[in-house]
Image (cartoon, rainbow, N blue to C red):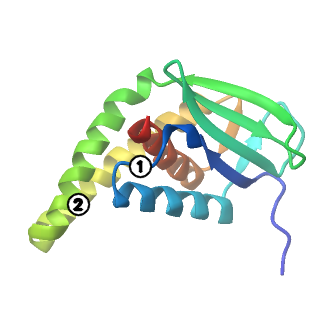
């Protein structure tokens, strides 16, 4: 067994005070994103010691809060990002996800594929925006940004 790199998230937690997700699909997305994120990620604080890190994600006053801790649960940094740049993408992403879940029940495979391509495109756009907004504070790879964007959507959905 190989050791995991230190430039990574060892744990991810969402603010529990906002309650459960609006649907079983949303809760499933949250669980999968957290599991996948902890299993494989690249996350480096640019101005702090190496990890591994613990991340607590929450929202407050229209901001996305990244509370980054060390393994002893000592705060290394608190990063607040305005949610404003994400609002349109998240709104569009929710709409396309609703269409996708409905299509799974009723549409043809080609219709489902078309909606899924649009859904992935919006997800990629949100992931790139998140990487850009974290630039200079945290370095993440694209897959990590994708999983984090899923959690941003879950927080927005639940909040």
Residue that badge 1 annotates: 21
- Looking at the rendered image, the quarter that the C terminus falls into is top left
Q: Residues within 10 Å of mark 1 (few under 14, many from 20)?
A: some
- The image shows residue 126, relative to residue 62, as above or below, that is below
* 1 or 2: mark nearer the eye: 1
User: Secondary structure under badge 2?
Assistant: helix
Instruction: Give the residue drawn at x 76%, y 47%.
Output: 54
Vertical placement of residue 109 versus 145, above or below:
below
Horizontal placement of 90 versus 114: left or right? right
When asked about the image quadrant of residue 112, the answer is: bottom left
Can you name the residue that lies furthest to the top here? 61
Q: Secondary structure at mark 1?
A: loop
Residue denoted by label 2? 101
Q: Residue at x 35, y 60 (%)?
A: 25
Residues 36 and 57: in front is 57
How far across and down, in percent of the image, does residue 58 sit?
58, 34
Identified at 73% across, 27% down, the residue is: 78
Instruction: Decide which of 33, 4 is in the foreground and name it.
Output: 33
Horizontal arrangement in the rendering, residue 6 relative to residue 9 (left or right): right
Residue closer to the observer: 54 or 116: 54
- The x, y position of residue 102, in whole percent, is 16, 60
Q: Earlier in the sequence, mark 1 or mark 2?
A: 1
Numbered mark located on residue 154 in the image: none
The residue drawn where x is 36% and y is 60% is: 24
Give the x, y percent position of residue 106. Answer: 9, 68
Image quadrant where one finds the N terminus: bottom right
Percent from the top left, x then y, of residue 151?
A: 51, 46
Q: Residues within 10 Å of mark 2 (few under 14, many from 20)?
A: some
| Displayed quadrant of residue 117 | bottom left
Q: CA distance from mark 1 to mark 2?
A: 15 Å
Contact between labelled residues 2 and 1, with CB atoms less than 8 Å apart:
no
Residue 63 in the figure: left or right of residue 136: left
């Amino acid at each position: 067994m190989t050791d995991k790199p230190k430039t990574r998230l060892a744990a991810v937690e969402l603010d529990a005070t906002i309650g459960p997700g609006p649907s079983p699909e949303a809760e499933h997305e949250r669980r999968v994103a957290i599991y996948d994120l902890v299993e494989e990620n690249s996350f480096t604080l640019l101005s702090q010691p190496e990890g591994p890190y613990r991340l607590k994600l929450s929202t407050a006053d229209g901001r996305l809060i990244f509370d980054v801790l060390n393994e002893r649960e000592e705060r290394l940094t608190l990063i607040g990002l305005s949610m404003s740049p994400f609002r349109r993408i998240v709104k569009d992403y929710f709409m396309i996800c609703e269409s996708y879940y409905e299509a799974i029940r009723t549409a043809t495979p080609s219709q489902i594929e078309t909606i899924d391509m649009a859904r992935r495109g919006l997800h990629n756009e949100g992931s790139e925006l998140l990487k850009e907004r974290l630039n200079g504070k945290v370095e993440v790879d694209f897959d990590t940004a994708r999983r984090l964007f899923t959690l941003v959507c879950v927080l927005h959905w639940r909040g």
